[in-house]
Image: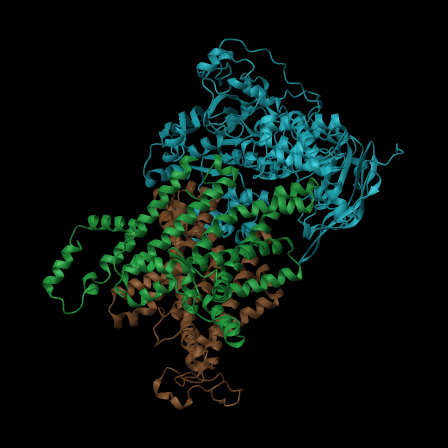
Chain colours: A brown, B green, C cyan
Amino acid sequence: MIGRLLDSDLFYSFSRSPVTVLAALVTAVMMGAAAFAPWVAPHTPFDLATLDLLDAFLPPAWMPDGDPRYLLGTDDQGRDVLSTIIYGARVSLLVGFAAVFLAMFLGVALGLVSGYMGGMVDAVIMRIADVQLSFPTILIALLIDGVARGLLPRDMHEEMAIYVLIFAIGISGWVQYARTVRGSTLVEKRKEYVQAAQVIGIRPWLIMLRHVLPNVMGPVLVIGTIHLAIAIITEATLSFLGVGVPATQPSLGTLIRIGNDFLFSGEWWITIFPGAALAILVLSVNLLGDWLRDALNPKLR
Amino acid sequence: MIGFVLRRLLQSILVMLTVALIAFGLFRYVGDPINNLVGQDTSAVEREQLREKLGLDDPFLVQFARFVKNAAKGDFGISYRHRRPVAELIVERLPATLELSIVAALIALLVGVPMGVYTGLHREGFLSRSFMTLSLVGVSLPTFLIGILLILLFGVVLRWLPTFGRGEVVALGWWTTGLLTVSGLKALIMPAITLALFQMTLIMRLVRAEMLEVLRTDYIKFARARGLSNRAIHFGHALKNTLVPVITITGLQLGSIIAFAIITESVFQWPGMGLLFIQAINEVDIPVMAAYLVMIALFFVVINLAVDLLYYLVDPRLRVDRDRATGHG
Amino acid sequence: MPAETPPLLEVRDLRVEIPTRRGVLVAVDGVSFHIEEGEVLGVVGESGAGKSLTGAAIIGLLEPPGRIAAGRISLEGRRIDNLDAEAMRRLRGRRIGMIFQDPLTSLNPLYTIGRQLVETILTHTDLTERQAREHAIGLLAEVGIPSAAERFDHYPHQFSGGMRQRVVIALALCANPRLVIADEPTTALDVSIQAQIIALLKRLCREHGTAVMLITHDMGVIAETADRVAVMYAGRIVEIGPVREVIEQARHPYTIGLMGSIPLVGHDVERLSQIDGAMPRLDEIPAGCAFHPRCPHASERCRRERPERIALGNAEVACWHAGELAGRGAVTAGVVRERRENRNARTGDGRPLVELRDLARHFDVSAPWLTRLFSREGRKVLRAVDGVTLTIPRGTTFSLVGESGCGKSTVARLVVGLYRPSRGTILFDGQDYAKLDSHAAMAPVRRRLQMIFQDPYASLNPRWRVAEIVAEPLRAHGITRDRVEIRDRVGALLRQVGLSESDARKYPHEFSGGQRQRISIARALASRPEFLVCDEPTSALDVSVQAQILNLMRDLQRELGLTYLFISHNLAVVYYISDYVGVMYLGRLVEWAEAKSLFRDPKHPYTRMLLDTIPDLEMTGRRRAPVAGEVPSPISPPSGCAFHPRCPLATARCREMRPEPLPRGDGGEVACHAVAENRLPERAPRETPLRQEAD
């Protein structure tokens, strides 16, 4: 199987594009660092015991007054910026992936059922999708978060915040998958291999799962990568606005918000480095998504 | 034609009612309205009286109907936090958001569409590739980050533009505008660009993709086979066919500018509805949240309707066989 | 012979290459030919032969990365293959025009056809806008668009397929080019419309003196229309010469094989001659003569050296052995068919296996109720099948023919259980299974009947391996679960359809169209059914591959005692394979009878009209009566007899009353008032074929 993969057109176009290879590399590094944060990060910025306020506001190591122990400087609490970035990326990626999986699962399932069953089921699901599309995703995410905030007592909300966030971003994103899968399902449904299975007498849900699903997953992958980038941005935005992850588990967005307060007083590194990290991460994911879309597009081949 | 309009109208009303239902649900069931309205030392009896006065014990449908009626009149009750009618707050803030959004939308359209057409026609040129790379960056940077960077560059380092607020405004009736003063215009530049950037790159990529798609069709091939000039093919045939499906999506995108204004207003401390909404989320100020929700839905629905009608006018196939091209219905 | 003036178009040693990541593919390899003024050159070949690319190269519209790698193309003596883009553009439309296959996508849907016409005229002439408009309206009338001035302002979607192709022709000819390249101009159209369009093209080109390069895979069209024909194979021309000579006295083994594999009405053969194998893919073209792996006469020289063109008679042939095979006669291959009566005795007892009684199927296609409220439309019902009654005896092949919209495919789907009938019964071996409700009740019936579909690319799940595809019925019907047994049975099935056991591990995309159709057949046979419904199983295949599949189906029928319901629009194929034929029009069965009987003595006016549309491959000179009108929409069929608007024998009674099926006299039935009232004119008997059966 690996041999087939390496020989495929996909891998060929991948290896021919240096930008994509770079993007893949960067994404891999960041994901790896985030996954293994406790081993990779030079410090433990969220263990209050290790913090020393005297180390606060240190500039990056290559500037005068910099300390080589804190490569990218420290923030107002004496936390090492590099380490906070690594842990922050972890949270950002966690929320991003989880939200995408939720949206993908929900969207693909609903789109498949909607397209294959047709009739009333299809009409209802698509109406709901239409109504939801009347709202920008960020608004939906904000709304769900606001409602959760109102419904749950404060401390419980803190604990649940990350799940609420994942739920909010996930729910706000299923429609795109559903519509695409529904469209593909409608096309595949007309194809004769589906009719052949019907003539044999295979039951509808089996046909959906075993015949149709493998053939509609292609575009889903592309949407997934793009959605990952959007999910990460959305989470960062919500955290920046103060309605995202709680301050105890800051994501890159939270870090940017924290640093924003110090931008004007000259400690630019507290916000710029997390900002750069976020931008690079999202850019790499987008590049991969772009390449994937072009590579999988049968018409361009 | 009438049938089409009426169907879309009914659909829109359905959407609005659903939104109203959600908003109402928020109102009634998230937190206790009474507790939020009165102080701690109000007696239980007085609370009961208040409850009755506000009709909080009436059946669900009656309350909902009342809510819808009031909402239609623009009455969303009193803000928990500001202790002022929500409608007043919104009217105060509306001009700021609308001005920002419309200017941003114009920028996004006037830059995005031509760039999209250009990069679609000249796939391989250097300029084209640079645009595409820049657009990728534009799509990857979150709006707030762009805002921060712009503030850093133009506000702090270069000191050319103000870093927050709206500048001086001129009142025209109940509307306040910043377009008539120099400081107002200067204050508008960065937020508008920040808001426009994401949509602009999206539109550009969309137009480009659609253009490439159209240039591959059989009728373009046939047009070439008939010896039509490049100009006739690109701008006569391809452009029109590209823009038709782009209309719907562009409309939706522009609608979402109003929502994205939330972020921009936050970063630039722009006194608009978005900022109000964020504060409301933080403070669990339900009436404001509900009102904002309904307003945004209204904007979206109106824009959707306008776009659908435009589509109908532009695509002759729809007048005979509607719903086929858009995937609606 | 060589004229003083150069030919209109001269192509010499044209070579078109397509660079890919796996190397450079040669799609057109040293093609040379010429076209004189006003001449029609047919370029015929199967898919992948390179004919479309040749046409694209001539007009300068090769899609990158394809490119002209070598050769010369000259128009009116001047070289055109090396012109720059702008100069080439000026040629297009003005001196060379092109027509594509699909009229649906050839026109810009957002502009009126009038505007598209005027635009083209203005590009190439100095007329004013008003003059251009008049010229355009005149053109529309010339191509046969009724009420041309009104329809000038209509959009493409307001025209039917045939009408659209007329508009396309008008567009291609409006600047009066000297040469028109027509790339499969009628393939996407109904048979009766095809005849109309071909006649139109012929007439216009003759009147304007335009030369035509007619690219098609349909030999019948070539026989009727072309003056000369070039046969292409694997990017090369293997034979080129006057049409009559090439068709009747083909010299190249490929042409001989090709002609022999085309079924002909009136030509009784037991088996169509078939060429084993398939045209090589572009990356697998053999050295020497590209045809040698499939050629029964291949020698060592053929394997090593690529043959040059030799003149024989008035034609040129690229084959080392052409001289020896000369005069073999093309349309003669095939073995004389055994008397049909014997066949019945062998395969079945003639008892009915499937019976349809007043079968009907309606679809509700009304607009949403809100729209109807305002436009005051009633409910719209599509009567796809409207009362069909027929009987299929065991062991026989019953074919349904008709044009698009006649309902034959819907009948197929009703019989197989994909649709439920709105009315009527379907009896399978005496049991009415249309009424069966539950999944479990239908299961035993499902084992005994199966279906083969038209599109070999869409009928196999691209993500499943062949083994899984063929084994699916075995698992679904619970025939066996044992892995070893499944593997053995799959292997046996594959062998039965002419593939090998090792093919089981591959994926569908690794096979050609014909091979995929074989896999479909293997799947259909897995549950050992008695009855197969075949929905246009060879319509998407090349002619030589079609012969293979038809032969295979005949063999299987004999071996396994199968009964077929065969759906097709191709009358020649139907003649070859059927025992009984039914003709459908707008959801009704207008006539059915024993196959030879029906073809020899068609009674219903529509059947007669259909038979007249078959292209005259035998070149008897029979004139085709052009068909009036187009097939009306099945949503609002004409009252009474559905055919009356187009029928030369229609009376008031035909308008009011729907005719009942009455016996024909040979066991079949025909539903026509004219027949019942004995008003049917005598029909000239079908002319005997020019050649005798041979071999």
Outermost right residue:
C4
Outermost left residue:
B45
Is residue C354 found left or right of B122 in the rendered image? left
Is residue C452 found left or right of C436 in the rendered image? right
Viewer can see residue C264? no
Q: Position of residue B67 (x, y in %)?
A: 25, 51
Residue occupying image coordinates x 51% and y 37%: B317
Q: Position of residue B202 (x, y in %)?
A: 51, 58
Location of residue C374 (image quadrant): top left
Is residue C370 found left or right of C256 in the rendered image? left
The number of numbered badges drawn on the structure is 0
- Front residue of this view, candidates C24 and C572: C24
Residue occupying image coordinates x 46% and y 66%: B143
Location of residue C433 (image quadrant): top left
Location of residue B22 (image quadrant): bottom left
Outermost top residue:
C678
Q: Is residue A136 above or below residue C445?
A: below
Q: Position of residue A25 (x, y in %)?
A: 54, 72
Q: Report the quarter where the C terminus of chain A lies.
A: bottom right
Q: Position of residue C317 (x, y in %)?
A: 79, 38
Viewer can see residue C90? yes
Q: Is residue A266 above or below residue C407?
A: below
